[in-house]
Image (cartoon, coloured by chain):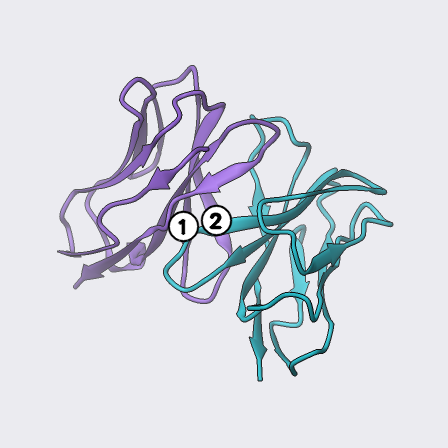
Chain colours: A cyan, B purple
Amino acid sequence: DGGITQSPKYLFRKEGQNVTLSCEQNLNHDAMYWYRQDPGQGLRLIYYSQIVNDFQKGDIAEGYSVSREKKESFPLTVTSAQKNPTAFYLCASSPSMSSGNTIYFGEGSWLTVV
Amino acid sequence: KQEVTQIPAALSVPEGENLVLNCSFTDSAIYNLQWFRQDPGKGLTSLLLIQSSQREQTSGRLNASLDKSSGRSTLYIAASQPGDSATYLCASTQGAQKLVFGQGTRLTINP
């Protein structure tokens, strides 16, 4: 089935460590996104990519990094510079960044700092 | 800067009732407005997308309306069922598919 796969589902990080969250889509979508969700809150945009080898900062990019070397993959690295990384991370994709497109989400990854 | 607000944060109703969820936004210059459903610990599922030129969209028991002039959107759920229990989020699009989300309304349908 077509969709977005995020892994791992649960991840624990020690203080000072970098961790990478995986996001793979087989929908042949050009645009991909990373959002962060805190308890009882809406989603906030971290990074987005309109096309391979291109990405842009969202509203809360500090302490995060991404790459887009392949169309189907958009991994997110949470660096040690991110002061409060414990959250639910959601990857999404859409056919393009045209405003008329439906956006599709993965099942999310829970990151906890221990 | 666009702000999207959903009130109430939580709502509990008996099964079978019709209900309305509210979404308000501060900047009326939107491309579209979307409603999503989120089950606990899961990703989001798109329910309805209303383009800025449209007034409403319908899918089954769901009907979403959009009034740009007043900065409001509503999601109407008819004949609610326990399976409708979830968090419902609305999001406006300002451009280039950059969504601004509300905090969501957690809906509980009691059997």
Instruction: Using the rendered image of the protein, determine whether residue A107 is visible from the camera's viewpoint.
Output: no
Q: Given contact means CB atoms under 8 Å apart, are the residues at marks 2 and 1 in contact? A: yes
- First-in-chain label (2 vs 1): 1
Where is residue A101? Give x, y as percent. Answer: 58, 31
Q: CA distance from mark 2 to mark 1?
A: 5 Å
Disc number for residue B37: 1
B96 up-or-down from A33: above or below: above
**Are there few (<14), some (14-19), or many (20+) residues within 10 Å of tag 2?**
some
Secondary structure at numbered mark 1: strand
* Above or below, comparing residue B30 to residue B37 in the picture: above
Local crowd at mark 1 within 10 Å, few (<14), some, or many (≥20)? many
Q: Which amino acid lies under the numbered mark 2 shown in the image of this protein? A: Thr
Residue that appears at 80% across and 52% down: A67
Residue at 74% across / 49% down in the picture?
Answer: A26
Residue A87: x %, y % from top left:
52, 67
Residue B103 appears in the rendering: yes
